[in-house]
Image: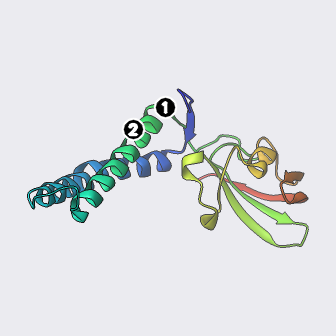
Amino acid sequence: MADERSYITPEGAKKLAAELNHLLSHERPKVVEEVAVAAADGDRSENAAYIYGKKRLREIDRRVGYLTKRLENAVIVSEKSDRTDQVFFGAWVELQGEDGQRREYRIVGEDEVDPSEGRISWRSPLGRALLKRKKGDEVVVRRPAGETQVTIVGIRYE
């Protein structure tokens, strides 16, 4: 991940920034206070509250570092596209599978992936297969479970 640019939607950047702000302004100060109280109790080597607090503090600091780096290297890509007939980053794409079922996916950055909400990475096999395709195109998706064919039935941008 060394100095690698990460593409992200404005919505995704806001979520990462909100998480970072919450960690720095709420979580970290709370845990620092808990550690200070636990440290005042005496022997730290056998103090479970102190040991857990220090561990939690390291986890928070690691996440803060990760989020800071991701936001520094983020390239925010506007979801609005003049070309609504083609799939680009940030598009909602409605697909019809070989089984006739329709599903909708949004092409997003790696930090925004949430399969339960239909958000897939532009680097995923499906995401890569859909980019620059048009409504009506039949797309073969190569995935670990084997190839499948989908048809693009709708493209929209919000």
Is any part of residue 77 visible from this angle?
no
Describe the element under mark 2 as helix, strand or loop: helix
Give the labeled residue for mark 2. 68
Image location (x, y in percent) of residue 53: 26, 58
Q: Amino acid at mark 1?
A: Asn
Q: Identify which residue, 84 or 112, lies in the foreground.
A: 112
Disc on res. 73: 1
Image location (x, y in percent) of residue 99: 89, 72
Image location (x, y in percent) of residue 139: 88, 52
> What residue is shown at x 40% (from left), y 47% (from top)?
63
> What residue is shown at x 21% (from left), y 62% (from top)?
47
Q: Amino acid at mark 2?
A: Thr
Q: Earlier in the sequence, mark 2 or mark 1?
A: 2
Q: Identify which residue, 103 or 120, lies in the foreground.
A: 120
Is residue 31 depicted above or below 63 in this figure?
below
Circle 2/circle 1 CB separation < 8 Å: no
